[in-house]
Image (cartoon, rainbow, N blue to C red):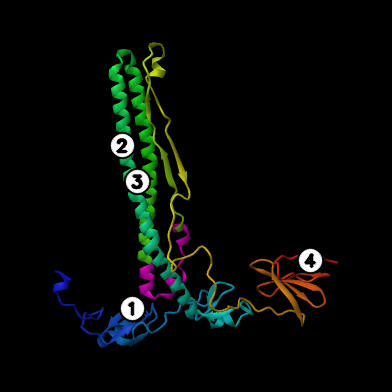
Amino acid sequence: MDPRNSAQDVVRCDVCNTPVPPLHCDFCQTNLCKACVGEHMLDFSKKHQIVPFQDRGSTPNYPNCSEHVKELCKVYCEQCDVSVCIYCLSTQNHQNHNLVDILSIIERKIKHLQRDLEELEKCIHPKYKEIVNTIPLQKADLNKNSQKLTTAIDKQGEVWHREIDTIITNLKSNVEEMESKHLVILNKQENEITRTISEISQTIAELKKLLDSKDVSLVSTYRSRIDEFRRLPPKLKVSLPNFTPQKINTEQLDKQFGLLSPFSITTEDHGYSLETSEAGSSPLKPLLDEPRIISIIQTQHKYLSSVTCHSDEEIWMCYSKKIMSLYNLRGKLVNEEYTDTDIDQTTGVETVWCL
């Protein structure tokens, strides 16, 4: 039945099909009537949160702690890249780490999902389809050129007699061999691009499903493949062969019948370009709107003179007494040197003379 000419069915209980159920389980995403709530709550294999139907989706579905399986994780440790529960916080494992509300991390992840989905749908997926659509045209040009070569060889062969039939056969065979090799390469690229398009389509579907599910566990485990899909396939640069007829010379039949230019094909890694809108993803990491605390480091000195990043995991600190200390982001002292100069913060280069 055409949905435009039919009435929309009312929402029903997912257990007994009763229309207009007043309740909803946020954790199970299940609509329930009053008669089915008790049976649903008796399923002790899952946690349940019953809310009025109009308030569905209002309860955060926090993940269970990997260390304390019965506890929910409402906090996220950015240094350890893991969600933690209240018992994890009571240990020393996350001391002086930057702990944030896990919902803010999920919100950040959802924005990332949305950006990936937008770029896949609006930019990457159409570009792949555009590229794969050019391959049948290349095949047609290849076939047209091969037919042209065959016709030229046949015409030149009619002028010659029986003694050059072998040469004609050999040249035709060369044309077919080059076409066959070219087709193998084109078919291979077509299959690879088609497979990638299928993976992109699957990723789009999974991203939509993640965005609709609001399942914190699934969203938090999402690993983006956007960088992989940004790498477009290399562009094939084809130099099609030509046939050059020569004047007849019975002493040099093999050379004078005609020269078939060699078959060649090259690839250009940057033959295709990907146009992205301002809202699309960029290879550069965007700047944060607000500064974010990565770690709090307690040092043994009172006055700090200068600081520079040794790496993503270590920081040099210089004090008024010309003491330089190397700390990691967990606040552990890695190394300490006595110097006769400060760290040059303007150049970003660490030049230190040790005594």
**Residue located at (65% from left, 79% from top):** 296
245 left or right, relative to 302: left
Question: In this rendering, which labeled residue sits more in front, label 2 or label 1?
Answer: 2
Kind of residue indicated by mark 3: Ile
118 left or right, relative to 341: left
Label 1 sits on a secondary structure element that is loop
Distance between the alpha carbons at the discs numbered 3 and 4: 59 Å
Marks 2 and 3 close (CB-CB < 8 Å):
no
Magenta residue check for 219: yes
Marks 2 and 4 close (CB-CB < 8 Å):
no
**Residue located at (16% from left, 72% from top):** 4
Kind of residue indicated by mark 4: Val
The residue segment tinted magenta is: 207-229
Pick whichever of labels 1 and 4 is earlier in the sequence: 1
* Residue identifier under label 1: 29
Q: Residue 352 carries which label?
A: 4
Pick whichever of labels 2 and 3 is earlier in the sequence: 3
Density class for disc 1 (Cα within 10 Å; few <14, some 14-19, many ≥20) is some
Label 3 sits on a secondary structure element that is helix
Kind of residue indicated by mark 1: Gln
Density class for disc 2 (Cα within 10 Å; few <14, some 14-19, many ≥20) is some
Pick whichever of labels 1 and 3 is earlier in the sequence: 1
Residue 283, horizontal then vertical, whole percent: 51, 62
* Residue identifier under label 2: 143
Q: Which mark is residue 135?
A: 3
Image quarter (top left, top right, bottom left or bottom right) of the N terminus? bottom left
Question: In this rendering, which labeled residue sits more in front, label 2 or label 4?
Answer: 2
Query: How many numbered marks, from 0 up?
Result: 4
Residue 245, horizontal then vertical, whole percent: 36, 23
Question: In this rendering, which labeled residue sits more in front, label 1 or label 4?
Answer: 4
